[in-house]
Structures are given as C-alpha cells and as structure tokens.
Amino acid sequence: MTIAIEPLHPLFGAEIKGVDIAAGLDAATFAVIRGAFEEHSVLLFRGQKVDDAIQIAFSERFGPLEKTVAANPARGTVFARQSNIDMATGALIPKDDRRMKYQAGNYLWHSDSSFKQVPSLCSILSTREVPPEGGNTEFASTRAAYDLLPDELKAELEGLVVEHSLVYSRSLTGFEMTEQEKAELPTARQILVRTNPVNGRKGLMIGAHAARIVDWPEEKGRALLDELLALTTRPEACYSHAWRDGDLIVWDNRCCLHRATPYDSTRYRRLMQRTTVAGDGPAV
C-alpha cells in the first residue's frame, strides 16, 4: 500500500489515504498508522468496508478493548452504540426513550472512559448508517490548548489531580442513573496534565466527566476546569467532521475531546459503532 497523510486541521488531525482496513494491514503499514496517531491525534480513513469483526480486528492492533458499561444500549459488548435504531425491531427509538436520553451526554465535550480507573488510549468510530444531514462529530485538541497556556499556569497545573465521573457528566443533561449503574461507575482520579510517552507533548485530561479538582475548593476548581475547556474548544480550534458512508475515525483520548452534534432522529436513521481501546494503566 502507498500511504498518504494529509492534514485535516491546522492544529491536529490527518486523513490517511491508500489504506484498505478490510484487506488487512502488515506490520510496516500499521507502524505508519500508529506513528501518525501519536503525531496527529485524530485519523480519518474514508471509503472503508467495515463490519463488526473487521473493526474489532483493526482496533485490537492498538491494544485490548474495553467492555461497554451497563448504561449504554450495547452494554456488555466491546461496542458503544450511537444510534436511534432499535436493534431488535429496526424501528426508530422515540426521543423520550431512556436510550436516547442516555445518548444526550454525547453532545457534551468529553474524553471517552476518562471516568474509568484505567483511562482509554483511543476510540475507533465507524459509520453503518448516516443521515443525509446533521450529526457531525467535532474534535478538539487539548495539546494545542496546553501549548497556549502561560508558563506560570502550566507550572500550577503540574501534579493536579481531577476526579472524573460518568454519573456527574450524565447528570448535566438530566439523565438519572439507577443505583445499580451508579455502583458500577465509581469516580476515578486522573492526572490533569498528561504527557505523551512517545513525543513528550503534554495535553489536558478535562471534559464533561471532569467533576472537580482534588483538594481544591469546589468553586475555584470548577472555574479552572471551565476555563481550560473554553480555551480548548474555541470554534477556530475545532475540527467538525461531516460523516460519509465508509468513514472510520480513530482519536486519541489522552489528548482529544469530542462531541456529537444534533440530527433529526425522528426522520433519519443513524448507526455508529464505537470500539474503545484500554490504556496501559492508571494515570494516577
């Protein structure tokens, strides 16, 4: 395969051309992809013919896969399903259904699985059915945001620990977890400033799951987390991806935030399948 790497955004992201994931990847080809992942954080592959088995095989090249938490519609599997389709009946799920209310949390800027004791390395999202309009996914780089911080603030952030919680982030949309779901989802502590072990670049572990800064007054910590989030997600610093059939995107949860954007779920069908690769250990 002849691989080309083309930028998606001035700050981060790249499209990888000349790769057929379904055909299988030799070690040399995957090494190029993995290197591009560390450098660009978000990788787009277009025109891919991906089913569940192919996506799992490709995802496992990055590492072992997480299982989805009980509150997700695809609970207990390696897939986190983003969809308005009832997989048993094929019908559209009503907007007031609990499954759709749970997915409302996807509209908040977040890093997948930062609420777990072992935060994830990356996520892989593929299209299965795409609405004709709406439903973009937006990405932002916390590495690019960190680079803009004044030195004195960078020094203050070093060593800070943030408590992350899915129960907290879902509460921001009014979604109520059951007691069983809450028991499965204890809070997790993550280092605020995380360093990439390959290139040494630093990013921020922030987003909707970031509930509070440990050992800081609640109001002061919340103000800082909100300030960092606003800096990271400035409109000009974000990449908005309009999905096409055959698209697959890999993104680095160590240094990227993402969010879904609305589409008309009462008119259009949408099915996206996400696999999530576990990290190699606790960040704290």
Image (tube, rainbow, N blue to C red):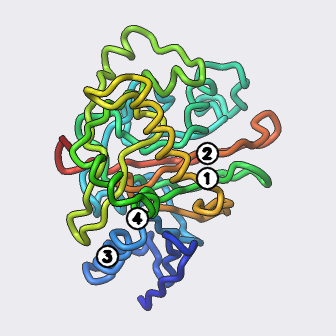
Point out the residue furthest to the bottom here: 2
Q: How far apart in space, not on screen, are marks 3 and 1 (Cα)? A: 23 Å
Residue 217 image position (x, y, % from top left) = 35, 23
Judge by depth and name the residue closer to the eye, 55 or 113: 113
> SS at mark 1?
strand
- The reply to whether discs 3 and 1 touch (Cβ–Cβ < 8 Å) is no
Q: Which residue is mark 4?
A: 147
Q: Which residue is mark 2?
A: 260
> SS at mark 4?
helix
> SS at mark 3?
helix
Q: Amino acid type of disc 4? A: Asp
Judge by depth and name the residue closer to the eye, 103 or 236: 236
Q: In terms of sequence position, does the residue under pointer 3 or pointer 1 come before the other?
A: 3
* Residue 104 as seen in the image, left or right of residue 169: right
Q: Which residue is mark 1?
A: 137
Residue at 27% across, 29% down: 214
**Viewer-nearest of discs 1 and 4:** 4
Answer above or below: position of 276 versus 115.
below
Q: How far apart in space, not on screen, are marks 3 and 4 (Cα)? A: 21 Å
Q: Which residue is mark 3?
A: 35
Q: In terms of sequence position, does the residue under pointer 3 or pointer 4 come before the other?
A: 3
Residue 44 image position (x, y, % from top left) = 52, 69
